[in-house]
Amino acid sequence: MNTRLENTVVRIAFDAMGGYNAPQAVVKAAARASLEHSFHCVLVGDGSQLDPLLQNETHNPEKLSIHHAAGVISLGSRPDQALGGVGDTSIERAAALLGSDQVDALVTAGNAGVATLAIKRHVPMLQGIRRAAIAAVIPTPRRRGAKKDPFCLLLDVGASVHTEAEDLSSFAVMGAAYARCISENPRPTVALLSVSREADVGPDWVVRAHRLLAGRAVDEHFEFIGNIEGHQLLSGEADVVVCDGFTGNITVRLLEGMADAAVDIAKAAYEKKLSWRLGLSMLSGGLEQLRRLTDWEQYGGAPLLGFQKPVLVTHSGSGERALVNAARVAARAVREGLVAQIQGKLG
């Protein structure tokens, strides 16, 4: 069955009150996206704040609307306490719009745990999936797929802290489907993140997940290559790397600071000695390339996989550029029929 919807105008809900730069950056992003023929944007949040901001932005009023929701959830809130019985928050209303088919996809820079819980209340999970997963892009030197994307996928990075072997196996299927859809990688390689390359070394759920995935070694949709250790993550050996959300979140937070740390160290060395200064001048192009590779804004957001609708979770510090790129990725997921592809591979 052909699930592609190439010419469809995709309806994107923006959680207008989510993120450190909300609502200003979200309004700017939605306004910019509304000027692209392929979007209809819905800003979900406090209309009394959104409307004045929107009037100052060039936008297409026929392709941008405001859906009022008075409540705001802080980034540090616990998911169970933040939502409680209150439904009048920007992320809860956006999730409700998604679940009722009033929009096709959702973009949020808010609290990822709160977003996951809100979406779970309103959007059914895919058949056979028990836990959702957030898939982050990890820059690597290796290019992959028809698009030559310079990254691998790491999931989960925070949607599900506690996972079983069956969940990790499902994450592998979902991650591979996403790599095929977005990077146009026909048969992605999949690995488990562990403390050893040995199949029988590591936590029980990882050992059992290895057995499950090894049993799918002849799967035509991806190639399982076994375990990889943390220091091999950046090599690009695997296109999709699977782990529990606790491990994944720590890993991605560590990697986020690597480029800035490298530049800071280089600056300190530059000021120390003339010989170091000359050497670093020769390396300046490489450092700039490293910064570009690790610029998370160019990748947009991380897909929240496992639900029957596309959701993109962006960095809490996202600005206009990252949010627009996230909307573009979400729109592509809709047009390429990502959810149907994942469900088809789950059986």
Image (spheres, rainbow, N blue to C red):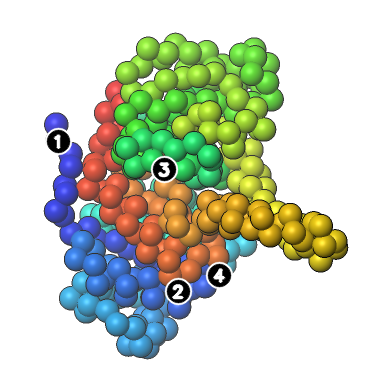
Q: Which residue is mark 3?
A: 149
Mark 1 Cα shell of 10 Å, populated few (<14), some (14-19), many (≥20): few
Question: Of label 1 and label 4, which has the lower sequence position?
Answer: 1
**Kind of residue indicated by mark 3:** Asp
| Depth check, front residue: 158 or 7 | 7
Q: CA distance from mark 3 to mark 2?
A: 26 Å
Q: Is residue 333 above or below residue 184?
A: below
Question: Of label 3 and label 2, which has the lower sequence position?
Answer: 2
Q: CA distance from mark 3 to mark 1?
A: 25 Å
Q: Which mark is residue 20?
A: 4
Q: Is residue 24 above or below residue 114?
A: below
User: SS for tag 3?
Assistant: strand
Q: Looking at the image, is mark 3 or mark 2 nearer the viewer?
A: 3
Q: Which residue is mark 1?
A: 2
| Depth check, front residue: 316 or 102 | 316
Q: Looking at the image, is mark 3 or mark 1 nearer the viewer?
A: 3
Left or right, residue 279 beside residue 74 = right
How far across and how far down the image is residue 155, in percent?
51, 38
Q: Which mark is residue 25?
A: 2
How far across and how far down the image is residue 285, in percent?
59, 56
